[in-house]
Image: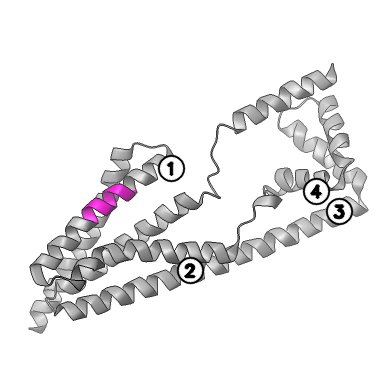
Amino acid sequence: MAKERLVHLFGARRARTSRHRDVEGNAARAAVLGAGDGLLTNISLILGVAGANPGPSTVRLAGVAGLLAGAFSMAAGELVSVRAQEELVGHEIDVEREELTHDPKGELEELAGMYQAQGVPESDAKMVARILMSNPAVALDSHARLELGVDPDQVGSANQAALASFLSFAAGALLPLLPWFVLKGTAAIVASIAIGIVAASGLGAAIGAFTGRSKIRTALRQLAAATVAAAITFGVGALLGAQGA
């Protein structure tokens, strides 16, 4: 009878959990967000420089420099932060492994207490804890998930995160720069704006799809952010260009 209650309790928990998507390890989501950052950053930079009315080569140089600087900055930031997270999680898991080895009784009581805190009856919680603690690997996994809040099997790869950030940012940053390789002046500015509008709207809709929000609302929000940033930088560039003339 107790086992039947356990199956019901934990089966229900798994069923509810399975409805949710992985919000931390979704590479496609991270790529969309990175591309959005690249687009917003570089369209603002390109239009800011273009507002001063320099030659197209100057705008291209600024755009390429912004693309590379932003992409390398994003990659370096991801590399450092994810590597630090890997090391922190690894250290905490090592500490937990040592505690399981030297104080199994205390860890069993701790695990049972965590299940009780989630609403599992005391007798069932102790039974589950004893079953899980009978297998060292399962015991460590359970403590890591419940006590540390991490999944030992899904710790991010620093190198992969850095590469994904570099590529996604660069892809977004390249879009508004493309017209400046074939056009110049007003035509290039208009083409950059048009590409920015389409890309910002598309990326906003994609973000809405990942977050479960209205695609139209997130597309408009992304478009509004890009419009404000680009308009301000273009205005500043035009003002500085006029003063320097």
Q: Residue at x 87, y 41 (%)?
A: 133
Contact? badges 1 and 2 (CB < 8 Å): no
Q: Is residue 148 left or right of residue 58?
A: right
| Of pointers 4 and 1, the one earlier in the residue sequence | 4
Within the image, what quadrant is residue 244 found in? Answer: bottom left
- The amino acid type of the residue labelled 4 equals Leu
Up-down relation of residue 167 to residue 111 (above or below):
below
Q: Nearer the viewer, residue 165 or 121?
A: 165
Check the picture and name the quadrant holding the N terminus. Answer: top right
Q: Tell me where the magenta segment starts and ends, as one range.
A: 196-203
Up-down relation of residue 125 to residue 48 (above or below):
above
Up-down relation of residue 130 to residue 200 (above or below):
above
- The amino acid type of the residue labelled 1 equals Phe
- Which residue of the protein is positioned furthest toward the bottom in this rendering? 245
Q: Is residue 84 left or right of residue 123?
A: left
- The amino acid type of the residue labelled 3 equals Glu
| Of pointers 3 and 1, the one earlier in the residue sequence | 3
| Of pointers 1 and 2, the one earlier in the residue sequence | 2
Q: Main secondary structure of the magenta part?
A: helix
Helix, strand or loop at mark 3: helix
Q: Which residue is mark 4?
A: 140
| Of pointers 4 and 2, the one earlier in the residue sequence | 2
Q: Nearer the viewer, mark 3 or mark 2?
A: 2
Q: Nearer the viewer, mark 4 or mark 1?
A: 1
Q: Which residue is mark 1?
A: 210
Q: x and y percent of residue 176 in the render?
A: 24, 64
Q: x and y percent of residue 2 in the render?
A: 84, 20
Image disc number at residue 75: 2
Q: Residue at x 27, y 73 (%)?
A: 63
- The amino acid type of the residue labelled 2 equals Ala
Categorize mark 4 by other alpha carbons within 10 Å: few (<14), some (14-19), many (20+). Answer: many
